[in-house]
Image (tube, grey):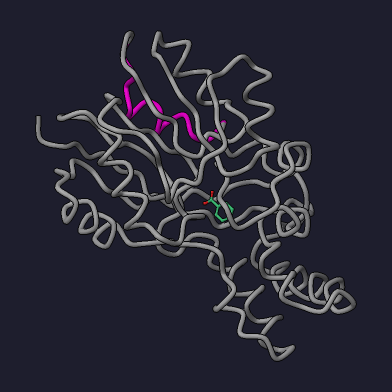
Amino acid sequence: MTGPSQDWQSDRYQTNAGFVPVLGMPALELLDPRPGERILDLGCGDGFLTEKIAEAGCDVVGVDAGPDMIRVAQQKGLNAHVMDGQALDFDAEFDAVFSNAALHWMLQPEKVVDGVKRALKPGGRFVGEFGGHGNVAACRTAMISVLNARGIDGAAVSPWYFPTPAEYGSLLTRHGFAVHTADLIPRPTPLPTDVGGWMDTFGESFFKALPREEREAARAEAVELLRPSLCDSEGKWTADYVRLRFSASLPG
Ligand code: BEZ
């Protein structure tokens, strides 16, 4: 669930983003893991869904770019390793590769899909979910805007890849996959904190681009820009998530 461009800390992730793996259950259902299958969980984070795959009777390997997250996954007894999803090091050994809420952190999707293809056995499945086109659009626009106002090109420091289903489907097809489903699913997501907490966890790349002394004011300005659209009359915040859920397979 985490990517290479941020400093992931498992305790902060748990507080501000514990909902991320829980909401990945529909993607896991689409994977339909079967007993005895060998499965790679790409971007496994702290191993919440990896554990579910193991409970389904699979031999599961988790990889994630965040050492702190991998430590937590290993403490759960999972077979988990630090690895950049853009440099996967497996060869024709998995029945399926699964990924939840991680692929949007990998800005070299060609390398990801190359590695997934190499990791799979003939006929292997690639199933997952990540941020699709329009994901967290309000949040992203607010952060870009407060950076632009301070003379920094906000779009240039955005750490995310949010393709349309057509773009992602075409990438998979070019790599030899048959695409079975690729759907954009709006999923307004209630936040456990205000959007400032969300930005602290997920928007680090934006605010890091500013001089330290400007960060707090920029963060406060972004929160106020977002308040009218994301905060309700009871003070509860909801982020404008949009998922791209897909399933594909290699020829047998
Ligand atoms: C996502 O899961 O879609 C996501 C999470 C944080 C930042 C951007 C996207």
Residue 151 sits in quarter: bottom right
Q: Nearer the viewer, residue 247 or 44?
A: 44
Q: Main secondary structure of the magenta part?
A: helix
Q: Position of residue 215 (x, y in %)?
A: 83, 73
Residue 108 sits in quarter: bottom left
Q: How many marks?
A: 0
Q: Nearer the viewer, residue 45 or 79?
A: 79
The stretch drawn in magenta includes residue 28? yes
The residue at the point 70 percent across, 52 percent down is 7
Residue 202 sits in quarter: bottom right
Q: Is residue 163 left or right of residue 103?
A: left
Q: Nearer the viewer, residue 170 or 40?
A: 40
The stretch drawn in magenta includes residue 60? no
Q: Is residue 53 left or right of residue 124?
A: right
The residue at the point 50 percent across, 39 percent down is 43
Q: Nearer the viewer, residue 68 or 14?
A: 68
Q: Is residue 148 above or below residue 43?
A: below
Q: Tell which residue pokes out farthest to the left in this image.
A: 252
Find the magenta span and give its range: 22-34
Q: Is residue 230 above or below residue 147?
A: above
Q: Position of residue 198 (x, y in %)?
A: 71, 54
Q: Position of residue 136 (x, y in %)?
A: 55, 61
Q: Position of residue 36 (x, y in %)?
A: 32, 9
The residue at the point 69 percent across, 46 percent down is 8
Q: Is residue 142 left or right of residue 53?
A: right
Which quadrant is home to the N terminus?
top right
